[in-house]
Image (tube, rainbow, N blue to C red):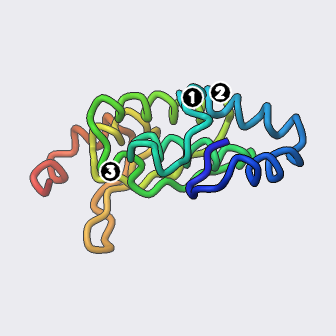
Amino acid sequence: MLISHKASDESLLKIFSKIPKDLTEKAENLLSFVGLYQKRKLRAGDLSFGQQKLLELAMALMNEPEMLLLDEPTAGINPTLINGIIDRLIKVNQDFGITLLVIEHNMRVIMQLAENIFCLAHGQMLANGTPDEIKNDKVLLMLI
């Protein structure tokens, strides 16, 4: 299990020996899903920023939510890892049936993820529609 603070191995054993096996298996499956299974024995603080974001996604999925609110899930992440996050979020939506509400400034990310897009500026709705409608909105393109 990944944790963010230092603790002795003995303390960890006491903590994690009480976790039911089915929860441990679920956590390991989610770590595998986000590509962190090989790093499962590391502390969260030892992971890169992008890996920490993937860990946060796995943690959010533990409760089997119906919806996830993601505030700039790709902010500060290197471009290579962004593609992996996009792929996993698409799977979360399509395979797990979880609705994603994503706030994001990276239009490439939004265009790949969204079925419906709402473009806001200073609290005002500029446009809404499908990715194709948004990318062809001439008024919006002049404002961006």
Residue 75, which numbered label? Answer: 3
Q: Is 61 on the left or on the right of 123, as rendered?
A: right
The image shows residue 102, relative to residue 80, as above or below, that is below
Q: Residue at x 75, y 54 (%)?
A: 11
Q: Residue at x 32, y 56 (%)?
A: 119
* Secondary structure category for the residue under label 3: loop
Q: Residue at x 45, y 40 (%)?
A: 51
The image shows residue 71, relative to residue 22, as above or below, that is below
Q: Is 107 on the left or on the right of 84, as rendered?
A: left
How many marks are shown on the rendered structure?
A: 3
- The answer to which of 86 and 28 lies nearer the viewer is 28
Write down the residue under mark 2: 95
User: Dividing the image into 4 quarters, which one contains the N terminus?
Assistant: top right
Q: Position of residue 102 (x, y in %)?
A: 46, 51
Q: Are marks 1 and 2 in contact (CB under 8 Å)?
A: yes
Q: Earlier in the sequence, mark 2 or mark 3?
A: 3
